Image (tube, grey):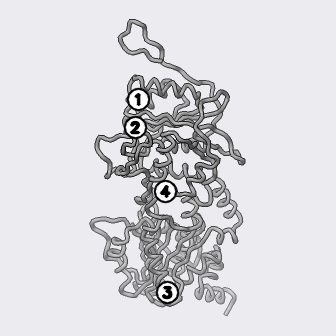
Amino acid sequence: MNRLSSGLAAAMLDIEPFSRLILNRPLRPYQLEPARAAIASALAHDGEQYVWRFPRQSGKNETLAHVHAYLLFLYQRVPLASIVHTAPTFDPQARNAMQRVLEITARNPLFKTLRTSGNTLIMGQARALFLSGAEREQPNVGSTASVLLSKDECQDLTQSYIERVFDPMTSDRNAPHIHTGTARHDGTYLAMKRRELEAMTRRDGKRRVFIIDWRDVARVNAAYGLAVESAIARRGALHPAILTEFANIETEQTGRLFDDRRLALIYAGAWPRQSARAAERSCITLDVGGASLGAFPDAQRAGEHDMTVASAHRISASSDGLNRFDTVDQLALSGANVLDDTPERRKLFTYIDQWAPLRIVVDATGLGAGLASALTARYRDKVIAFTFTAAAKSALLNDFLALIETGRYRHYRDASVDSHRFTRQLEKCEHHYYGAHVQWGVPAHVAWRHPITGADEPLHDDHLISAALVAVLSDSDLQAREVISSPAPRRAPHDDAQVLV
């Protein structure tokens, strides 16, 4: 047997020489173990199931592509040999998975017969079908996965639909299943499958769950380790994105958002509220009463609106030059109409003028758009209008938690009502994941007892949202600008309209 033949024979026996010698793209050790386990099950037709959880950008999709290419190569002479791959969407996710197989086999003479037909890769008599796993009324139920069923990004797939439509595809030849993705929270399909397979492993000792930590990747890729360490420096080691995307640790699907540890970070070195001081950099963030996206809309009470709250923050720099914010005061206007020229709005403008902020972030959702327009007319390019959507509010939370986890956000604490209200809103704030977004805030049914009047009243999350809006500025260049204030002109005394100040 010549050298080429012996190398080809070795490559057919194991994916490590196949990836290294045939594809010329060697897999790393943390990729090889889960790939070998899945291939062994495909060859044995033992119907095993596996979970792969890789950190972000560490080669999970590449590993799947190598497995698909290897099995197509092995089964090209086997009649009706078939692989089915599903992802939450066909375009781009499933299509990208198909394209990745084509990329790693491009210009390889051993794969010269590999071709595409619609959403299918065909090599000899073997084929790999790429499908969307999104729920639809008339799903594709006629496909067969005789060699392998791979389910990518399972954290975004619906368990009942996948088990009803896709799992029966493996019945004919008892093909194995691979469930891949990254951690999100403990309520996903991927998390459920992890728990199920770990319970089986405790009974028979066979490893079925492969969870890769970013440190596993860093051991063989120093650049990756440096990139993750940089992300940790910006967000904190316990930030949800770091935990789920790099440490591969699931968070809770629902529950209290600001625990005692986070409260301690927020109130580190606590001080009483402070007044405006000249020559200090500051910013103002505004939550407009009744205008922002509620935390739990289905539970909101009609006719009950929160306050309009302005938060004043002092701006400084952390040791690594990033923006740091200390909330030093809050102005709460209860039942106030700040959308028109009213005494309450003039009070708000006076408050802003006292602080001479470098930036003003205003909730411009719904009716808040009117106030945002008035602020822009008065303060020009200092104003940032923020519109709440499910995606925007999720992103705001991520940025706010990054400030907290890295010690770049603190809040005053004293005996004032506003301070008590903010603390209680932190304590009662809940979160719940809906798909890729997290819904967060104080549920509408939660009440608190006013420390002065003793009356029970809705708690809301106005003070909290107002404070959190400072995260919009976390990566901004907060140098002073020339334009400080451009008040609207006073009307002539004979004008019967109210005078603007």
Position above or below: 138 against 369 = below
Category of crowding for the residue at label 1, using alpha-carbon neighbours closer than 10 angstroms: few (below 14), some (14–19), many (at least 20): many
Distance in Å between CA atoms under marks 2 and 4? 22 Å
Q: Nearer the viewer, mark 2 or mark 3?
A: 2
Tell me if I can see residue 113 in this picture: no
Q: Which mark is residue 41?
A: 3
Q: Earlier in the sequence, mark 1 or mark 3?
A: 3
Do callouts 1 and 2 mark residues in contact (Cβ within 8 Å)?
yes
Q: CA distance from mark 2 to mark 3?
A: 58 Å
Alpha carbons under labels 1 and 3: distance apart: 66 Å
Q: Residue at x 29, y 40 (%)?
A: 303
At x 33%, y 71%, the residue is 161
Q: Amino acid at mark 3?
A: Ser
- Amino acid under disc 1: Val
Of the image marks 4 and 3, the number of the one nearer the N terminus: 3
Secondary structure, mark 2, is loop
